[in-house]
Image (cartoon, rainbow, N blue to C red):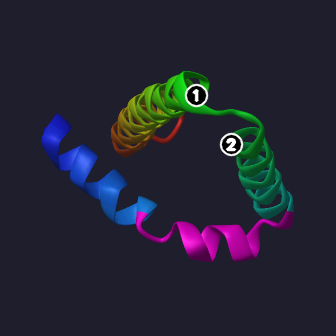
């Protein structure tokens, strides 16, 4: 089941470009992040640059794992609410 939910999330995540267009605040935040990363990359050299890249990679992995986990938890909660709603009887 978890694999199925991860596949659903992955297909939704591929539509990120459309999400950025629909959410101006999210688009600005993403652009700011990219600009800051580029500025830091120009300031760093050698080992510091390598370490910064490792940090970015680790943060991306951590963020992706957290987002998938939150998606799965939210999806499961939504399904539980739907099942509860189907079991609802008039007068309860």
- Circle 1 SS class: helix
Q: Residue at x 55, y 30 (%)?
A: 46
Instruction: Give the tally of numbered discs.
Output: 2
Instruction: Report the side of 26 relative to 75 (left or right).
Output: right
Question: Is the residue under label 2 in contact with that under label 1 (CB below 8 Å)?
Answer: yes
Q: Quadrant of the N terminus?
A: top left
Q: Residue furthest front?
A: 46
Tag 1 residue: 52
Picture layout, residue 9 above or below residue 17 = above
Q: Main secondary structure of the magenta part?
A: helix
Residue lying at 54% horizontally and 66% vertically, measured from the top left:
16
Q: Which residues are magenta?
A: 14-24
The label shown at residue 41 is: 2
> Mark 1 and mark 2: span between their CA atoms?
8 Å
Q: Position of 88 compared to 33: left or right?
A: left
Nearer the observer, 59 or 48: 48
Q: Is residue 21 visible?
A: yes
The percent position of residue 80, horizontal first and vertical second, equals: 37, 33
Q: Determine the image quadrant of residue 37.
A: top right
Query: In x, y percent, where is residue 39?
Result: 80, 46
Query: Dot 2: within a 10 Å radius of its alpha carbon, few (fewer than 14), some, or many (20 or more) residues?
Result: some
Residue depicted at x 75% and y 38% = 40
């Amino acid at each position: 089941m978890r694999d199925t939910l991860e596949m659903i999330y992955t297909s939704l995540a591929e539509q990120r470009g459309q999400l950025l267009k629909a959410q101006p605040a999210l688009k600005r935040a993403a652009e700011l992040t990219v600009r800051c990363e580029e500025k830091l990359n120009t300031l760093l050299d050698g080992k510091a640059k390598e370490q910064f890249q490792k940090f970015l990679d680790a943060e991306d992995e951590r963020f992706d794992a957290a987002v998938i986990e939150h998606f799965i938890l939210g999806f499961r909660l939504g399904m539980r609410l739907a099942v509860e709603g189907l079991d609802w009887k008039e007068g309860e």
